[in-house]
Image (cartoon, rainbow, N blue to C red):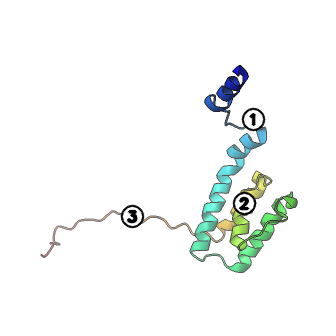
Amino acid sequence: MVQKIIRLLLTKVIPAPTGSRYVEDILYNQRVYPIYSEVQQRLTYCLKNKLINRDELITFKYMLNKCIKNSYAYKDKKWKNDAHEIFTKLKSHYIKPKEMKRLLKYVNQFYINIPEPIQEFKTVSYLKVIK
């Protein structure tokens, strides 16, 4: 009876450690994730605004497949379309920072950075509002 209570306390009351103890996971979050986030956002922007066509998307998919060393991880996976496959494989921990930067460089060819409009208006004394 006492053992059951102790087991219950250990499993329910005391929280399990949530942080990862593996060096690879910690380094991935520090090195690769910021680059991944930028690639993902820019690729989404390019796809939504039709700045990238199908041939360029297939080229990006080919580059991404070359970056992933463990191709067996996605062997039996069914994809809805090419974009679904690309965004799923971008999350892979098998991609190194150098390869992710190469993917970012490819996406930056099509990404257009539109600056925000300047909101400075000069007021002129001789213009009046007519009601």
- Mark 3 / mark 2, whichever is N-terminal: 2
The residue at the point 17 percent across, 67 percent down is: 125
Q: Position of residue 22 (x, y in %)?
A: 77, 38
Q: Which mark is residue 118?
A: 3
Examine the rendered structure and indicate whether residue 16 appears above or below residue 60. above
The residue lying furthest to the front in this view is 1
Quadrant that contains the C terminus: bottom left
Q: Which mark is residue 52?
A: none
- Pointer 1: residues within 10 angstroms few (<14), some, or many (20+)? few
x, y percent for residue 37: 63, 56
Residue 54 figure quarter: bottom right
The residue at the point 68 percent across, 56 percent down is: 36
- Does dot 2 land on a helix, a strand or a loop? helix
Residue sitting at 71 percent across and 50 percent down? 32
Label 1 to label 2: alpha-carbon separation: 23 Å
User: In this rendering, would 42 be left or right of 96?
Assistant: left
Q: Nearer the viewer, mark 1 or mark 2?
A: 1
User: The residue under label 3 is which amino acid type?
Assistant: Ile
Spatial distance from mark 1 to mark 3, Cα to Cα? 48 Å
Name the residue beneath numbered marker 2. 90
Q: Position of residue 117 (x, y in %)?
A: 41, 66
Where does label 1 land, which residue? 21
Image spot of residue 71 (x, y percent): 86, 61
